[in-house]
């Protein structure tokens, strides 16, 4: 799944979401022809050990764009690491999951829940939730610190959602890093976190592609030595020792706690005379490091008595890991070199916050938003954590049509002059303002855009679809026609012919009963000749008919096979137009449907008396779209209950929402085919 932003495209490709692989049979078959039998035997043994623990993960994940929460499906891999069903995968696979379904080695599908996730190391831990107790087969971790360049490894996973697959390669690099000269814009970031600051990848040449993400890198003893993550031509895996330590903490505590000092560091200059220490390039204001007296330009020599020598980029991850592992709240002594002298500083690490707090949608405003973390507030030069950060705005929505319109990176600080400190307060205030209202409510929003402070009236709330009402019914001739143009008249050899050509006679109507046929030429009504000879006169016949009363019989002069006929036709009542049909909008599933009009039934050639509700539109990235509901579908049933009109549909979907059903089965008529669609929403509290 690639976005339109070039960097996002590059990053998605790097994550391994392009899709193609080599099956286990094909790969091991090649190995049999080209490798000694002893190696083939080791490969078979390793595959046999890990295969029962290998899973394909189908993820329904959420993203946020244009003021909406967008749902999408992605595929990744994972491995079961405990007999009670914990499994490991990448954060970029499962970290934003709404629902997850894991396909086991025997093709059984089991739903899983997210236990915890760590974007900084790109590791997520899931827990399988079988319907009945199961003791799972699991894979064991090896010691990734002992691996050597040139050793054979197997990359296992489910690329392109294919069945379990294997590729063979060798370890190419045990400390792969991203070059600093790539610049910060091409660093591998997830949720604002620089993964490469802690992870030093195992580089290998076993092919990995999209869908391999989160799958294990296995040695020939069948032990996990890495978690496959990236591919830049050379494949990259998170070292197994690092992944295992993160997994253990998430399984025990649900998250990873790390210490934070507020320092930015980089390797020593190439021509620096000093051979020891690491260069402190920056100190964040009000951070523990700032309070302890660190300054940019200091050389950090030791922390807690341990040397901190970093001359090369490959050494940075070790240092950052050591700083992140300091005891939170316990003072530690650091020694820096400043102006040629050693200076001891005493710093108290604090717990590291996430860079980007969870993003969410607030439909009543038509925007997505998040709270501030300390680091995010610092980067945006905010004086405090107060306010709600706008992350995207829906075009045409309440916030998008305000004057001035709200934009991404605006900060909402007040509503109706009442301070708003965070997203929780904005949600509560919005609920209070809109409760019981069926019309949008004007609210005065105070928001800050960089250093400027703005006011805007935002009409918040979801406006219910109104019954469009009936247009005045008039007399109607139940046929479709086109003007007899001058060119057509000439080709017919009757240049003086004027009027209308019948293209369709609606079945079961008074026109059909009167004997009108497609191909007839209408030249007069009640003896009054028609003058239409060009498209600009296309309303002449319908305007003339509307002047009669419903039920009146008119005499049409009709030319058929060069014979002139007088055909009496009773005028019908004009049917409701498509725009007049009652509608229903599901805000949970994000689609709009309406009742079937006479013209829909004729156009789609529906059976007489066919019941159902016609889907008019489905929003991209909605639960309905993920369930493959499409515009033009005729909804017949919801969970086996018939749907005859929009009231039936509303009642059934409200029941589904109240019961928070995990799977909703919708029966639709799509063309000549009947389909059953399974929609699997994730209900939020």
Image: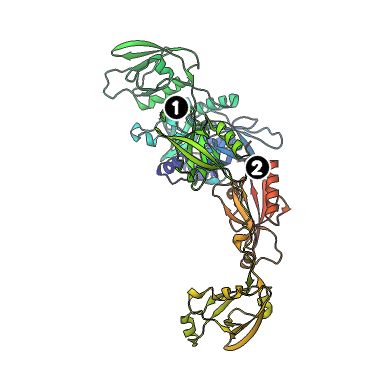
Q: Is residue 580 above or below residue 391?
A: below
- Residue 407 lies left or right of residue 100; in this view the side is left
Query: Which residue is at a point 51% across and 81% down the rendered structure image?
Result: 531
In the image, residue 209 lies at what x, y percent? 48, 43
Query: Which residue is at a point 36% across and 27% down the rendered structure image?
Result: 313
Colour scheme: rainbow
Mark 2–mark 1 CB contact (< 8 Å)? no
Q: Of 436 and 204, which appears nearest the observer? A: 436
Q: Which mark is residue 375?
A: 1
Residue 211 visible to the viewer: no
Q: Quadrant of the C terminus?
A: top right
In the image, residue 434 lies at what x, y percent? 60, 40
Residue at the limit of the structure toward the right, as seen here:
641
Q: Secondary structure at mark 2?
A: loop
Instruction: Give neighbour class at mark 1: few <14, some 14-19, many 20+ (Cα, 10 Å).
Output: some
Q: Quickly name the residue at label 2.
A: 108
Q: Nearer the viewer, mark 2 or mark 1?
A: 1
Quarter holding residue 254: top right
Q: Of 273 and 576, which appears nearest the observer? A: 576
Q: Of 383 and 519, which appears nearest the observer? A: 383
Q: Which mark is residue 286?
A: none
Q: How many marks can you see?
A: 2
In the image, residue 6 lies at what x, y percent? 40, 44
Q: CA distance from mark 2 to mark 1?
A: 44 Å
Q: Of 344 and 199, which appears nearest the observer? A: 344
- Residue 453 lies left or right of residue 425; in this view the side is left
Q: Secondary structure at mark 1?
A: helix
Quarter holding residue 660: top right
Residue 559 visible to the viewer: yes
- Residue 24 lies left or right of residue 112; in this view the side is left
Q: Is residue 173 above or below residue 511?
A: above
């Amino acid at each position: 799944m690639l976005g339109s932003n070039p960097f996002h495209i590059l990053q998605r490709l790097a994550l391994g979401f392009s899709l193609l692989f080599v099956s286990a049979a094909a790969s091991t078959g090649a190995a049999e022809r080209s490798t000694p039998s002893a190696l083939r035997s080791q490969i078979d043994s390793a595959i046999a050990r890990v295969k029962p623990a290998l899973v394909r993960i189908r993820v329904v994940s959420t993203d946020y764009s244009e003021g909406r929460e967008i749902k999408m499906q992605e595929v990744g891999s994972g491995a079961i690491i405990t007999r009670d069903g914990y499994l490991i995968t990448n954060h970029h696979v499962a970290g934003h999951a709404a629902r997850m379904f894991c396909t086991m080695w025997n093709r059984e599908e089991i739903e899983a829940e997210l236990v915890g996730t760590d974007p900084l190391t790109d590791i997520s831990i899931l827990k399988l939730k079988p319907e009945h107790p199961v003791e799972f087969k699991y894979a064991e971790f090896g010691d990734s610190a002992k691996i050597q360049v040139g050793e054979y490894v197997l990359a296992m996973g489910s690329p392109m959602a294919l069945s379990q697959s294997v590729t063979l390669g060798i370890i190419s690099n045990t400390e792969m890093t991203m070059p600093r000269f790539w610049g910060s814009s091409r660093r591998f970031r997830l949720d604002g976190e620089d993964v490469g600051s802690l992870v030093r990848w195992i580089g290998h040449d076993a092919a990995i592609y999209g869908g391999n993400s989160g799958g294990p890198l296995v040695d020939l003893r069948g032990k996990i030595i890495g978690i496959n993550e990236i591919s830049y031509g050379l494949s990259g895996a998170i070292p197994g020792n690092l992944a295992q330590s993160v997994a253990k903490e998430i399984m025990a505590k649900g998250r990873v706690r790390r210490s934070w000092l507020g320092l930015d560091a980089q390797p020593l200059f190439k021509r620096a005379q000093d051979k020891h220490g690491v260069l402190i390039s920056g100190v964040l204001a009000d951070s523990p490091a700032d309070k302890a007296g660190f300054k940019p330009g200091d050389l950090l020599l030791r922390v807690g008595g341990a040397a901190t020598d970093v001359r090369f980029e490959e050494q940075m991850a070790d240092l950052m890991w050591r700083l992140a592992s300091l005891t939170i709240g316990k003072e530690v002594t650091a020694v820096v070199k400043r102006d040629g002298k050693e200076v001891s500083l005493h710093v108290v690490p604090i717990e590291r916050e996430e860079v980007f707090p969870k993003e969410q949608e607030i439909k009543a405003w038509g925007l997505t938003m998040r709270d501030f973390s300390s680091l995010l507030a610092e980067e945006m030069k905010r004086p405090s954590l107060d306010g709600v950060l706008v992350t995207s705005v829906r075009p045409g929505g309440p916030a998008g049509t305000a004057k001035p319109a709200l934009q991404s990176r605006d900060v909402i600080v007040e509503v109706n002059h009442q301070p708003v400190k965070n997203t929780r307060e904005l949600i509560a205030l919005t609920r209070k303002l809109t409760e019981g209202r069926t019309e949008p409510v004007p609210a005065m929003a105070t928001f800050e855009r960089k250093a400027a402070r703005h006011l805007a009236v935002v009409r918040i709330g979801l406006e219910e679809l109104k019954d469009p009402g009936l247009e005045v019914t008039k007399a109607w001739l139940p046929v479709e026609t086109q003007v007899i143009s001058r060119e057509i008249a000439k080709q017919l050899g009757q240049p003086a012919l004027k009027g209308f050509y019948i293209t369709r006679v609606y079945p079961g109507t008074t026109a059909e009963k009167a004997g009108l046929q497609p191909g007839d030429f209408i030249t007069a009504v009640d003896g009054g000749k028609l003058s239409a000879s060009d498209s600009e006169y296309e309303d002449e016949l319908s305007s003339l008919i509307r002047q009669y009363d419903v039920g009146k019989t008119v005499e049409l002069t009709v030319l058929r096979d060069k014979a002139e006929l007088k055909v009496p036709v009773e005028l019908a009542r004009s049917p409701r137009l498509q725009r007049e049909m009652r509608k229903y909008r599901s805000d949970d599933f994000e689609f709009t449907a309406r009742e079937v009009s006479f013209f829909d039934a004729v156009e789609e050639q529906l059976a007489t008396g066919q019941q159902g509700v016609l889907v008019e539109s489905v929003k991209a990235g909605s639960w309905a779209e993920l369930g493959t509901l499409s515009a033009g579908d005729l909804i017949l049933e919801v969970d086996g209950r018939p749907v005859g009109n929009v009231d039936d549909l509303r009642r059934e979907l409200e029941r589904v929402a109240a019961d928070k059903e995990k799977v909703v089965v919708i029966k639709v008529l799509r063309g000549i085919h009947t389909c059953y669609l399974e929609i699997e929403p994730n209900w939020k509290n």
